[in-house]
Image (cartoon, coloured by chain):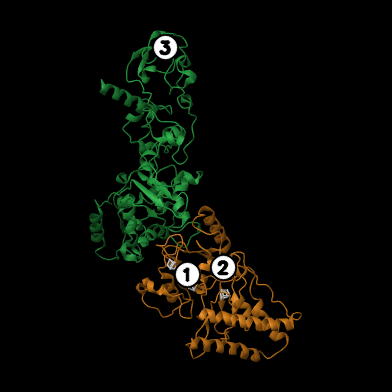
Amino acid sequence: MIRRIIFISLFVLINATLFGQAKVSKNHPLTGLTCKTCHSCNVPTSKDPCLNACPRAEMTTVNQTPAQSPEVEVMKELSNRYAPVVFPHRTHAQMSEMSGGCQTCHHFNTIGPIQPCINCHETKRQRDDISKPDLEAAYHQQCINCHREWSHRIDCTSCHAEKGSNESAAISSSIKKMTGKIHPEIAEPKKLIFETKYKSGKYVTFYHDEHVKVFGANCVDCHKQQNCSQCHDKGKATMIVTSLSGAPIKMHKPEQQHHKPCFSCHQDDKCSTCHLEKPSGPFNHEASTGWALNKFHENLSCSKCHGSVKKFEKLDPACTSCHNNFIQGKFDHSAAGLKLDENHSSLECENCHENKDFSKPPVCSSCHDDKNFPKDRPGKTVGKIPSKKIKSLK
Amino acid sequence: MQKQNRRDFLKTSAILSTAIAGLSTNKTKAKPKEILSEDRMGVLVDTTVCIGCRNCEWACKVAHELPTKPKESYSDRTAFKKLRRPSEGALTVVNEFSNPQNLNIPTDVKVQCMHCDHPSCVSACIVGAMSKEENGSVIWDTDKCIGCRYCMVACPFQVPSFQYDKALNPKIMKCDFCFERTKIGKLPACVEICPVETLTYGPRSELIKIARDKIKHNPDRYIDHIYGENEAGGTSWLYLANQDFAKIAFPNPGDKPMPGTSESIQHGIFAYFVPPVFFYAILGGIMWITKKRKEAE
Ligand code: SF4
Ligand code: SF4
Ligand code: SF4
């Protein structure tokens, strides 16, 4: 029985997530495509379905995971001075997850497929359109700034092999060496406590896991400037260790730089939203918004109700502001765990749920003097009736 | 140190010339304004792109047949330990500064002649050896140059240098915007070699548009200032940076063309038919003192 209930509620939930928002065909999730084939974001909503351009199934766009991306690329467009460059693409895709994602290099994305650099960047330095760098400069501007950030070197030979007779042998041996190489997964801190220099509001507790798993932020929403040197520069390694150990982190950057990643979402918030007198607990929907999440909502992603991750919308707490099917004749009451009997199935919602406030227990007194919920029920129980005690988000 | 001395020198000569100008206010005839070609070329130097590889220094020397060490030796970062100025043996140099936006990536700045739109070196030259060409370059005729070093004094960017070590017929040296190369349709040597295209060669008017666009689209990356757009009345070489130009050793010559100072020296001289030799003696004397002081330090 319990298994059936779980199955039904899961089914309802999945259906609500997938179908509740736009008119898409019933077999929408069963087409054998991954979500990312059609949607560029993690949680498409009806307002912002973030659809890739058509035809989607055959097209390669930058909306893919490192694992889906090409492993090694040989760049030979400009091999006049040096041998072609063997570029471990997938490893770089993995590394870029913390520093801007695919867009770091693939910065010009039409709604169509990935554009090769050479489509825009000319191979000749002497050219008419000087508004964008030539191909050599375009490559180098992408590569060298990251490379010199941690290596502090700018010599050509770290990427370029000399031209020569054994060129092709060198290339195939590089390809072999780079194939199968992966960047280890980056350790993610659970929470970070910042100890600021302010007298009041000294502490900022940042729940890293929550921002990723609950609020749905992507790494690159905050980690834009942090390249390899964040971990690979010797001087900085100690800071990483501190942040993973959970010990308070002292301000080590100019104030503006500390605020920058936060402000891309929190620009309209008060200081006291984050700055508190002591390290604080995790997010609590009821405490922060006055509206507790019940079991139907606690597993939903925030953007399901509040729209785009970058700017969560404030909602009207009335159920019908989201659930436009909470009206007589449209709503299948069994989804609430109780199948209404014949006498009750044609009543208006308000007759039992005063003011359409579904968070309160229903009342029988408008018609019956001698009946009381939950002792008396207007139909057959088909599942667990939502408990009055409303749980908040863990 | 040298910088300080030369500035002292400039100051002293400015006082001197003001005195002369004072004598000759009514009589001085203004030189006809340089006629600037609408399509004159320039270079946009994006200091946020430069990686400090100093390939440009090497290429410049090769193109001008100046003695140089092998190209590989230019990746030596110790060259950045002290601030360098263009010299008679290196017409362009790259200096390194700290970058407030990212301490791991220093800011590298290539310096050379700015190829002013109203070059004070041209107005200062008493024999008319220097000229502003139609393509934007400010060049000089070695045959005419008498080595008087007026241009050195006049330049607001301390660019021209003097071949002190040449005993016979020493001349002025500076970046010539690769005039001999551009004449035959080649790019300036430094522009051609730069691996990241820090240096964009093109019509000055177009470069200003590109620079404005860059600032507009990357307000976090650049400060809202195109150095050279108005400095010293405008220059052919233009710079973009992510910090105040004073912090990366650029002087502030103001927005007005600078020729006033030195022009009044020579015009004053000729207005009164005072034998120029007398003034050479004074200028030479000042230089001698300055040099002595430098040696003493
Ligand atoms: S920077 Fe100096 S040398 Fe160059 S054109 Fe201007 S005044 Fe003349
Ligand atoms: S333009 Fe020519 S002379 Fe001037 S710095 Fe570049 S390479 Fe040297
Ligand atoms: S060649 Fe280009 S990148 Fe290298 S130092 Fe010169 S201007 Fe900078």
What is the drawing colour of chain B? orange
Q: Left or right of B16: which side holds A314?
A: left
Residue at figure coordinates x 48%, y 79% from the top left: B87
Which chain is indicated by disc 3? Answer: A
Same chain under badges 3 and 2? The reply is no
Residue under pointer 1: B110
The answer to whether residue A194 is above or below residue B128 is: above
Tell me the residue that label 3 is attached to.
A345
Q: Point out the tag, 1 or 2, that comes first from the N-terminus.
A: 1
Closer mark to the observer between disc 1 and disc 2: 1
Residue B236's label in the rendered image is 2
Image position, residue A390 (x, y; %): 38, 28
Q: Nearer the viewer, mark 3 or mark 2?
A: 3
Q: Are discs 1 and 3 located on one and the same chain?
A: no
The green chain is A
Q: Is residue A188 above or below residue A44?
A: below
